[in-house]
Image: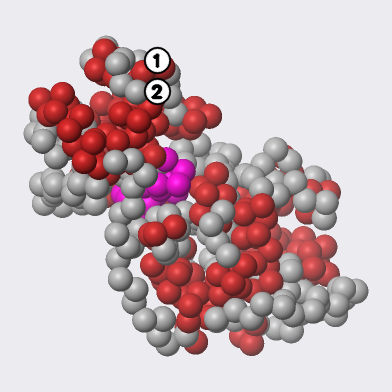
Amino acid sequence: MKKVIVSLLLGLGVLANANAQGDVEAGKTKAATCAACHGATGHSAIDTYPNLAGQHADYIVKQLKAFKDGSTRNDPVMSPMAAPLSEQDMQDLGAFFASQPSTPSDAPAASEGGAPAAPAPAAIVGDAAAGKYLYENGDESRSIGACIGCHGKEGMSDVLIYPNLDKQHPEYIEKQLKQFKEGARDNNYAMSQFAAPLTEQEIADLGAYFKDPAAVAKAAPAKAKAVVTVVGDVELGKAKSATCVACHGTDGNALVAMYPKLAGQHEGYLLKQLQQFKSGARDNAIMAPMVAALSDDDMKNLAAFYASQTTSKVAKPDAVNEAGRKLYFGGDSVRGITACAACHSPVGDGMAAAKFPSLANQHPDYIKAQLEQFRSKTRANDANAMMQNIAIKLTDKDIADLTAFIQSL
C-alpha cells in the first residue's frame, strides 16, 4: 500500500518569513472576533467551521496569510476577517489557539454568541474503522495514498505546517475533501490528486474517524496488496526494450548510477517522459535519438513493461541524514521550500495518478543530477515549473542532504 501522503486537508503552501513571536495573552484578546464561529477557546460549536484549539500555530498563521493574500485561499467569510490582520496579529492568534487543549471537555466553555445552528447530519453515515484503515493504508489500486505520513498517528502531525486532524468536526473534514475533489479549493495540487478518487462514503468514513481517532480500537481487516495494473502490453514492451538494455539493464534496474532505474516506476510517469523526450519538452542528447522512431504504442508498451518489474534495492546508509529528513518532510518555510513528502510520499513511492515519480531505491547519483538540472533549468519538463521553483532555492548542501536521506527510504 502506498503511503503517499499528501496533506489531507489543508494546503501545503509556503509560509512567508515570520520573525514575530506569538503572544498567547494578546492572541486571546484578538480571538474575541473569532469566537462566534470558532468558539472562545477554538472549539467550534458549528460543525462546518473547524476547531482551532490545539492546532499548530505555524499552520494557523499559514492559513491566515493565505486568506489575507487571496491568491491561494479565497473564502467570503475568512478573507475579510484576515484582511486587517498584521503579521503580529496572526502570530498571536496562532499562539493562543495552539495553547488550548484539543479536547473540548478540558477547556473552558465556549462563549455564548449568535452562532448559526449546526446543519443537519449528513445522509451518508461514516464508518470510523473504515476511515482509519484508509487513513493508514490508502488504496493502491486507485492511487489513493495513505494520510498518516503527513498527518501523523491518529491525526496528530509532527510537521508544523501540516494540520492536526484529531478531534476535528466530521462535517468540516468532509467539506474540505469535497472542495479538493471538486476543485473548489485548488491551493494544493497534491491534495486535489488525493481527493479526486475518493467516494462520498470514503469521505464520510474519514470524517467519522477524525471525530475521535483514539476511540477506534482496530482498523478494518487488512486488504491484500493490489497487483500492479498496466495499460500497455508488457510482452511487446519487453521485446522493444532490447535497445534500452545497455543503459537501463535487462529489467530496468540500471547498473550504472548515472542512469535511472526504470523498474517499478509508475507507468504514467514513464510514458510522459518518453513522450517528452520525443517532443523535445525534455531535452536530453542521449534519449532524443533513442525515442525518435518510437510510436505511441511502443512508448505505452515500454512504460508497461518497466512498471511491471520490481525495483532492486540500493545500499542503505548507516545513519539517516537528519538535515535531509527535515527538508524532505517539512521543507523550509523561511526559504519557501515545499516538503518533498507532499508529492513523493513519506516512503518515496510518489503518486501514480499525478505522475509524481517514485524515488525510493533510485540511484542517489541520478537523483542528485536531476535536482541540479531542475535548479539550473536544464531540465524543465515539470508541470507548472514545480520542481524548478523548489530546486532553485536549494544549496549544494541541501541537495547532498536530500540525496542522502532519500537513499535511506
Real-space Cα separation, disc 2 to disc 1, in angstroms: 6 Å
Position of 138 with respect to 323 (left or right) is: right
Residue 210 placement (x, y as % from top left): 55, 75
Q: Residue furthest right?
A: 114
User: Could you tell me residue 261's position as x and y percent?
Assistant: 20, 37
Which structural element holds mark 2?
helix
Q: Give the residue displayed 52% in from the left and 49% down from the top.
A: 193
Q: Are marks 2 and 1 in contact (CB under 8 Å)?
A: yes
Q: Which label belongs to residue 276?
A: 2
- The residue identified by callout 1 is 280
Question: Left or right of 245: which side holds 339?
Answer: right
- Position above or below: 282 against 146: above
Bin the neighbour count of mark 1 within 10 Å (Cα to Cα): few under 14, some 14-19, many 20 and up: some
As displayed, is residue 21 above or below residue 382? below
157 vs 66, left or right, is left
The residue at 40%/69% (across/down) is: 136
Relative to residue 216, is residue 61 depicted above or below?
Answer: above
- Is residue 40 visible from the viewing direction of this image? no
Residue 112 picture location, percent across and down: 85, 80
